[in-house]
Amino acid sequence: MGRYQVLIEAALSPEINEFIQKAQEGNFDYENIHVLNMLNTKYIMAGREENAVFQNPSANGPAWFPQEVLFVSSNAEEMELLNEINTKSQVTVNQEEFGQVAIGAGTIELTSYQPNKLTYQVDASLGGLVVFSEIYYPAGWKALINGEEAEILRVNYLLRGLEVPEGTAEVELRFEPSTYYNSSALMIAVQYVILLLLIVGLVISYRKF
């Protein structure tokens, strides 16, 4: 959430204000709202009136293959670049955290969406980086490529990225926090213990009568 707040202050707010100013002059410059587009923003609200909501035809979509990787070494450098690049064709990666990342090519389609599980079908003519319009959150999110776990990268300051192999593949992003599953197992065990104690108590009471 801290990263998202920085993005709002350093990129989103200026971009929205500039778009609204242009829109008031009759220039709906959807192509140049690159940060909003990378977040797959489908609608922009410029007021509370009915005609103040605009559909954005230039949103990047749920996922895409960028054509160029721009490597950075710090958060400040990445944020500065993010205000300059075309997020449809370019992507930033912090090489100090994630190393070198290969560029890829192909198509990717979101085939199933649930709050805790997203499924994509990939057809890559060249294996490499895919960008997802989802917030990077390593505490619980896992990526599976054809059932095998893969590392989720942070790209464009706060989005998820994934290196996919050449050819067709199914990609799943799942929210499976270990704390939830560990506590779930404990709760199930406790429930069985309570049930067992209840049965024992009933048997003892029955024998007394």
Image (cartoon, rainbow, N blue to C red):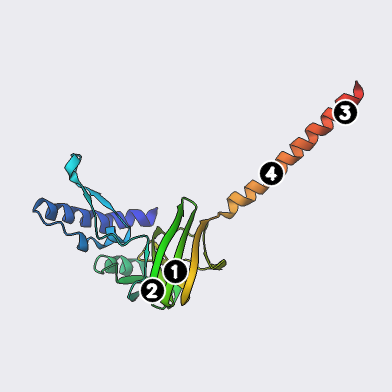
Pointer 1: what residue?
122
Instruction: Determine the residue positioned at 87% across, 25% down.
Output: 206
**In the figure, residue 14 lies in which quadrant?**
bottom left
Packing grade of label 1 (10 A; few <14, some 14-19, many >=20) is many
Q: Secondary structure at mark 4?
A: helix
Between 171 and 176, which is closer to the camera in this rendering? 171
Find numbered disc 3 in the image and state the secondary structure of the residue it sits on. Answer: helix
Question: Looking at the rendering, which quadrant does residue 111 occupy?
Answer: bottom left
- Residue position marked by numbered label 2 in the rendering: 106
Q: Look at the image and tell me whether residue 92 can be seen.
A: yes
58, 81: nearer the viewer = 58
Q: Residue at x 49, y 52 (%)?
A: 116
Q: How many marks?
A: 4
Find the distance from the CA under tag 1 to the CA under tag 4.
Answer: 38 Å
Distance from the alpha carbon under mark 3 to that under mark 1:
61 Å
Task: Identify residue type, mark 1.
Answer: Val
Q: Relative to the observer, which residue lies in front, 55 or 15?
A: 55
* Numbered label attached to residue 188: 4
Indicate the position of residue 8 as horizontal and vertical percent values. 29, 54
Which numbered disc, 1 or 4, marks the residue that appears first in the sequence? 1
Is residue 101 something one can see in this rendering?
no
N-terminal label among 2 and 1: 2
Give whichever of discs 4 and 3 has the lower sequence position: 4
Taking the image as shown, residue 163 lies to the left or right of residue 146, namely left
The kind of residue tagged 3 is Ile
Q: Secondary structure at mark 1?
A: strand
Label 2 amino acid?
A: Gly
Amino acid at circle 4: Ile
Q: Which mark is residue 156?
A: none
Q: Nearer the viewer, mark 2 or mark 3?
A: 2
Q: Secondary structure at mark 2?
A: strand
